[in-house]
Image (spheres, coloured by chain):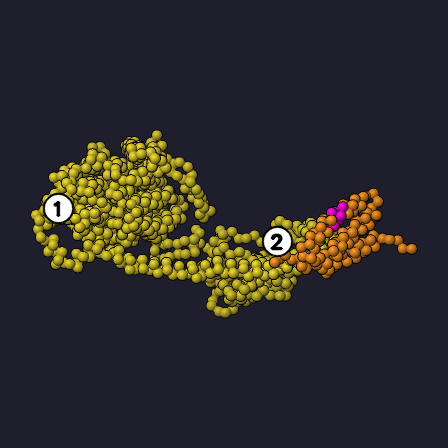
Amino acid sequence: MQQIELGHYLALSSVIFGLGAFGFLVRRNVLVQLMSIELMLNSVNLMLVGCNRFLPDNHAGQVFAFFVIAVAAAEASVGLAIVISLFRLKKTVHSDQADSLRH
Amino acid sequence: MAEKALLGIVLFPLLGAIAIGLFGRRAGRSAVHSIAVLSVAASFGLALLAFAELLRMRLDQGKELAAISFTAYEWFTLTWNQRPIGVPVRFVMDALSGVMTLVITGIGLLIHIYSTGYMSEEPSYARFFAYLNLFTGSMLILVLGSNLPLMFVGWEGVGLCSYLLIGFWYENTSYAAAGRKAFVANRIGDFGVLLGMLLLAVASNSFELSAINAVAEQRPNVFTGAFSLGPRGMPYWVVPGISFGTVATLLLFLGCTGKSAQLPLYVWLPDAMAGPTPVSALIHAATMVTAGVYLICRLSPVFALAPVTMALITTLGALTALLGASVGLVQNQLKKILAYSTVSQLGFMFAAVGCGAFAAGFMHVYTHAFFKACLFLGAGSVMHAVGAHGDADIRQLGGLRRYMPLTRATFLVSCCAIAGVPLFSGFFSKDEIFVGALSAGSYFSFAPWLGHAVFAALVLAATMTAFYMFRLYFLTFSGEYRGGPVHEAELGHEHVAHEPHESPASITVPLIILGVGAVVAGYVWIGIAHFEPWVTWLAPALGSIGAEHPHNAALIALASGLAAAAVGIGLATLFYYRKSDAPERLATQFRGVHRLLLDAWRVDQLYDRTILAVSRFLARASNVLDVYVIDVLTTVLPTQIVRAVSFLFTRMQTGLVHAYGAVMAFGLLALVLHFVVPHGDPEIIGDPQGMKVELSASAGLGYEYRWDFDSDGTFDTPWSADRNATRDFTDADFVRFAVVFEGASYGAHPRTLTVAPKESLPVSASAVTRALTSAQISADEFGPNWQHGEDNRLPQINADQDGLLITPRGARVRKDGTLQASEKPVRVARGESVTIGFARLTVSGYARPRVQVRNVFGIQRTQSVGVVVPKVARRLTAQVAAARAGVP
């Protein structure tokens, strides 16, 4: 059976990051965009812990992943609060219509 | 002690001006005039002290140039021709500036005292005295300054103060206009002074007046040589036929015509009566207008070397004397007659100094100061007495001798002095001016008759002077009082004649002192007691034209001077004392001439139609240019561009989150790409040492480098983390030849061209291709006379394996200083150089070392840099000069 190498971790996290970035750019539903952001954050987490697996004496990657999880939680709560406010204001969750800064 | 006194002489009036200017309005009148009079009195006292010291030094040291000097500090330093020219704040009192200082402070003091009485009802009392003190202080800087820039400070200072004081009653627009006119006329002259003094400094490498005069005396060819500008040894502008001294002195003289009211810039002086009468006295007697004569006397050794300028000075002086006197004949305004008389008397002074009679001209400055101050102050006293404001019409005066005996006596004495009545001061100076004009003969080798022509003009002017001064005297003081000036308020009402009255002591005491001066001042010419006569006293400070007095000059001058005074006074007595109707008859008979003289030759109108019309046209044209071209280019167009661009950028702000996200994503992608590709960017550090060159590539994360110095494709060093490399280049490393080409024009920067073996370097005939591409040499860069003959052939520059082969084909090609044959190729190997015409061509090696960089991703990149060794040092100016000197 084949060993899981660093390259596999990196490839997987890159693919997830790419999906997240693509989703953020092309979807117009704010909720989906938030989920895409979560996807990107977690792909980075995967890369951090994956790298850390090959440096057993060092825990920086794992510790950093915890930080990212904490920041992501805060971001998600604030982001959802904004989405709720947007829905109350515009009766929609489409980012296209949240352009009052421009007009 | 006496040295420090010089500083005090200058500082007291200036400090007084500052104190009065800042605090005068609140301090009250008595404080203001106490400060003003005391500061000038202190200055006068110190001037006497310093002058006494100067006299003592002269007695001790004999005829050597005795001078007291005080250096306050170093003001600034200029560099010219790699040599520093220091400009210190230094004051020097010698024979010339000593006399001048006494005149300025002495007469200035009397005018200050007079003003306390004359201006007693003026609301802007403090402002007046602040200006008056500043005027005196500026004039003292002008006179005592030891160098031209310091003198120029005073020169501009008196210009400014004259503007402020002539326009003192600026509520009256015509007075304010007179002030502006004085300022502008003076500015025109000042530009000449500025250029002239820079030329003198360039020629003598110093701004110090004494140093410039020493150069004129010891190395006169500096000033008599052809006019040229540019670095020593290789001037870029030479004007044959005109001497350097002529140009410099002409420019200085332009300044003198402005400051000292000579043709063509005299027009401001008659208008300067707009100022209060004491100001007129100050301007006409003690300060300002004497500055021009003083400057010429100060630099007399330089002026003496420029006969062309001197001829112009004396001619314009004589013409100004005639013009001023002729206008004075018919004027009816009291101060206007005196103003034109000043113009005329200044003409006498310039006619004298122009003939090389510097001592005589300066003597007239000195005597004129007394009698003209006395005349103006007397006129002021008269106006004060009859209640006239601005000016008084002498046809409405008369009979004043009964009411104001003191004023009348001093006025009469001064009239005698200016008319040249024997034994009065003006007689001595005028006599010597005549002698000077008669002696000029051989000095003007191109026009030996000039001195005699000037003499004739001056005698005529002197006759007219005697006439108009006594006309003025008789109309004002003799006969019956004709009722005084009619005030505007009385128009339409019956005129009430005020009883004239003698002026208060503050006015009459200065008049008496000046009147005494007007009598006795002239005796310094012959010397009193054990004092030296005027000429010997001034001799060390003045230049000389080495003229001999013709043996009968003194007699002719004396006879014509006496005749002029007698005829002038006699005619005036006949016409105006005896109450003849001849003046009216003459005026009606020669109506045109009379009108012309009354309008002062209509010079103002002439200037208005010509110079001012052109100037106004230029002003309008510049306004159009400013509004429709410059404003459009600098404000309208840029704002429209900014607006258009900002419109484009606002379109980019969509307000859509995903659009911003996309931009950010692409930006990140570009950054990532930049960091993934390695950047070597090799460069040379420092100057090559011989063939040894230190090279360096850029640093980066995990970069490794290897070098290929001879660009043969194989790398000479192994992979290494060190980004620096040193290489001692050998002939095998070079891929091309570097040709460093230095053009012939002065200051041209050398440029480096490269040529590979078996190629050739193009030489073009026209300058246009050079402007388009610097990768070519064009024939005009070789300088003048680069060919033996005149044909269309250009030198050929080819390269082979060992260096350049230059075929001159008619060009003057030199190698190691020897001229090469025309059709034989000249070999120029690496490190050698040749000259083509005045240009130089040096061959060096050109290598193109490459560096390969790889980063952590294993991506590799190769970049290269050009290296020219050995480095060619730039030629020094001296070498260029030597190369030029060696070429016929």
Of marks 2 and 1, the one in the foreground? 1
Image coordinates of residue B127 in percent, x first then y, are 32, 40
Q: Which residue is mark 1?
A: B482
The answer to whether the residue labelled 2 contacts the one labelled 1, judged by CB atoms less than 8 Å apart, is no
Q: Residues within 10 Å of mark 2 (few under 14, many from 20)?
A: many
Quarter of the image with the N terminus of chain B in it: top left
User: At numbered mark 1, what does the secondary structure look like: helix, strand or loop?
Assistant: loop
Q: Which residues are magenta?
A: A70-76
- Relative to residue A43, is residue B149 depicted above or below? above
- Tags 2 and 1 on a common chain: yes
The residue lying at 43 percent from left, 60 percent from top is B627
Check disc 2 and give the amino acid type. Pro
For this rendering, which residue is in front, B258 or B88? B258
Q: Residues within 10 Å of mark 1 (few under 14, many from 20)?
A: some
Q: Quadrant of residue B796?
A: bottom right
Residue B630 within the segment the image draws in magenta: no
Query: Which chain is rendered orange in the image?
Result: A
The residue lying at 42 percent from left, 61 percent from top is B625
Image coordinates of residue B302 in percent, x first then y, are 32, 47
Calculate the distance from the C-alpha at mark 2 to the C-alpha at mark 1. 98 Å
- Identify the residue at the far top of this view: B1
Q: Which residue is mark 2?
A: B870
User: At numbered mark 2, what does the secondary structure look like: helix, strand or loop?
Assistant: loop
Image coordinates of residue A102 in percent, x first then y, are 62, 57
- Relative to residue B507, is residue B605 depicted above or below? below
Residue A75 within the segment the image draws in magenta: yes
| Apparent side of residue B349 relative to residue A98 in the rendered image (left or right) | left
- Identify the residue at the far right of this view: A1
Shade of chain B as shown in the rendered figure = yellow
Quarter of the image with the C terminus of chain B in it: bottom left
The residue lying at 28 percent from left, 54 percent from top is B264
Q: Earlier in the sequence, mark 2 or mark 1?
A: 1
